[in-house]
């Protein structure tokens, strides 16, 4: 298939699930991040089983002007080839024990898989360059593991040179010691070591399962490490390999700017994950701190007003903070999201929920929502029936009622009389944002 038609097919698909504005926001964000790169780690099984989708997605990224750094493994093919040849191998703590026989085979397979991917990309006119050594300087990790490397430094200059020449580097996870001994590397660690050194903006792990799943086997869409890491590590249903990966990701995000995020997805869903707010996969963020206030001073009030006005593109009533209705305020430490809950009625009313446009898709909305939710077992709120946020509200409310252009939602209200009151007052609230 010609590149242009891939681009058009994927763009049409993206437009059917999100807006042009949203897609453009991400294309601009990801193709112009001031020398901060996107790293894509490709699980070995994908080159073997899902090459077509991988190549289409990478070729789409290339078409819209993104130059990612691609790192791949070759694990499953290596295992089957070792079996075929009758070479014994074993794992220790999830790492392959690498004898010199295993190493030889690993290098061959890495080379073959690398060539397969590079050629498939070149066939689609994507300028991809094969990189199979001289990137990861290592020492031997643990003598019990044999020829397995631990990365000490990465040759970022070589990678940058490839990118500067408008090529996409396709890097095999092979390391070497200062004496030139080649070593087998875990592809996740290889990707992470590059991400650290170049302060990557986005790191993507492509796998066949395409995300992290909860106990009911539902895909977890967003993980906020500040809020959820400890809980997740304590969960029995999360298997040890995933815990290890989460730990590595946390270590990485802890040292990178908070705008950096990690996504786990599958090749076919990569464009959707990258270029829509909702994504398709699991997004992992360092997380956000959200503060709660029972009252606010003028400066905080101005902060919140600015967040609300930016998010809603309107002007907040000048008298909004002046009346003496008791309110609870939630503000994110980055000053890009706010919630105001008013206690005018017996049941608290969520009067404002604002996330500025540029912060959408970062998990900030769900972080501030979760924090507010912890304090409120009962709540009602309203939103215009045309507001795209209704999808989210539907997923978190206990019930809702449509009325005259409004959707009115509630949580934890089962008494009919109270509910009627909530619906009536939600409907009658005076508008406090003015749109020109
Ligand atoms: N497109 C955005 C990004 O790549 C948001 C992705 C949201 N993904 C998710 N699984 N919740 O950063």
Image: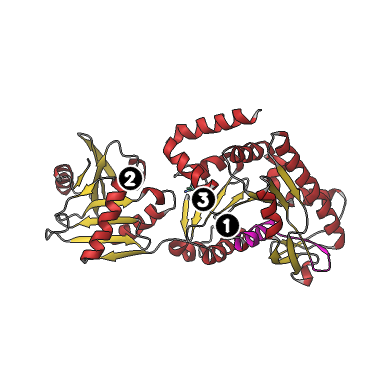
Quadrant including the C terminus: top left
Residue 305 occupies quadrant: bottom left
Please rate how many residues cluster around mark 2, counting C-alpha atoms within 10 Å: few if below 14, some from 14 to 19, many from 20: some
Name the element at disc 3. Answer: strand
Q: Does the residue labelled 1 lie within 8 Å of ligand 1?
A: no
Q: Is residue 184 magenta?
A: yes
Q: Is mark 3 within 8 Å of ligand 1?
A: yes
Quadrant including the N terminus: top right
Tell me the CA gap for discs 2 and 1: 33 Å
Q: Name the residue under label 1.
A: 200
Name the element at disc 1. Answer: loop
Identify the mark at residue 141; answer none if there is no mark.
none
Q: Nearer the viewer, residue 51 or 91?
A: 51
Q: Name the residue under label 3.
A: 282
First in residue order: circle 1 vs circle 3 = 1
Q: Residue at x 74, y 50 (%)?
A: 74
First in residue order: circle 2 vs circle 1 = 1
Residue 201 occupies quadrant: bottom right
Q: Residue at x 63, y 45 (%)?
A: 208
Q: In this rendering, would 21 be left or right of 376?
A: right
First in residue order: circle 2 vs circle 3 = 3
Image coordinates of residue 51 in percent, x first then y, are 69, 39
Identify the mark at residue 393; answer none if there is no mark.
2
Q: Residue at x 73, y 34 (%)?
A: 123
Image coordinates of residue 64 in percent, x first then y, are 56, 39
Tell me the CA gap for discs 1 and 3: 18 Å
Please rate how many residues cluster around mark 3, counting C-alpha atoms within 10 Å: few if below 14, some from 14 to 19, many from 20: many
Up-down relation of residue 402 to residue 113 (above or below): above
Mark yes or no: residue 280 visible.
Answer: no
The label nearer to you, 2 versus 1, is: 1
Magenta residues (range): 177-196
Mark yes or no: residue 32 visible.
Answer: yes
């Amino acid at each position: 298939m010609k590149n242009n038609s891939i681009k058009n097919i994927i763009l049409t698909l993206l437009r059917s699930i999100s807006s042009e504005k949203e897609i453009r926001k991400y294309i601009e964000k990801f193709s112009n991040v001031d020398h901060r790169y996107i790293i894509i780690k490709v699980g070995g099984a994908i080159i073997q089983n899902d090459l077509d989708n991988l190549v289409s997605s990478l070729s789409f990224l290339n078409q819209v002007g993104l130059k990612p750094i691609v790192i791949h493994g070759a694990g499953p093919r290596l295992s089957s080839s070792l079996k075929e040849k009758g070479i014994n191998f074993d794992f220790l703590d999830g790492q392959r024990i690498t004898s010199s026989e295993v190493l030889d085979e690993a290098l061959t397979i890495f080379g073959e898989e690398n060539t397969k991917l590079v050629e498939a990309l070149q066939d689609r006119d994507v300028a991809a360059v094969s990189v199979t050594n001289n990137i990861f300087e290592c020492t031997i990790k643990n003598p019990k593991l044999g020829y397995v490397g631990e990365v000490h430094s990465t040759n970022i200059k070589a990678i940058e040179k490839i990118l500067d020449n408008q090529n996409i580097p396709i890097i095999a996870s092979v390391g070497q010691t200062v004496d030139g001994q080649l070593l087998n590397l875990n592809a996740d660690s290889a990707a992470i070591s590059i991400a650290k050194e170049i302060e990557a903006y986005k790191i993507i792990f492509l796998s066949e399962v395409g995300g992290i799943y909860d106990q009911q086997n539902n895909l977890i869409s967003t993980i906020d490490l500040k809020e959820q890491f400890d809980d997740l590590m304590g969960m029995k249903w999360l298997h040890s390999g995933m815990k290890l990966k989460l730990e590595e990701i946390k270590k990485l995000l802890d040292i990178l700017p908070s705008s950096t995020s990690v996504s786990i997805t599958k090749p076919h869903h990569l464009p959707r994950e990258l270029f829509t707010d909702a994504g398709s996969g699991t997004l992992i963020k360092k997380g956000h701190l959200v503060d709660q206030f029972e009252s606010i001073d003028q400066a905080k009030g101005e902060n919140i007003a600015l967040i609300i006005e930016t998010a809603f593109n309107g002007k907040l009533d000048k008298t909004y903070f002046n009346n003496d209705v008791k309110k609870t305020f939630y503000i994110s430490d980055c000053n890009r999201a706010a919630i105001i809950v008013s206690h005018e009625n017996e049941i608290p009313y969520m009067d404002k929920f604002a996330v500025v446009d540029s912060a959408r898709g970062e998990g900030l909305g769900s972080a501030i929502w979760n924090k507010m939710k912890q304090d409120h077992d009962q709540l009602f709120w309203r939103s215009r029936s045309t507001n795209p946020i209704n999808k989210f509200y539907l997923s978190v409310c206990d019930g809702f009622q449509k009325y005259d252009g409004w959707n009115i939602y509630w949580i934890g209200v089962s008494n009919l009389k109270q509910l009627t009151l909530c619906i009536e007052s939600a409907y009658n609230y005076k508008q406090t944002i003015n749109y020109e």
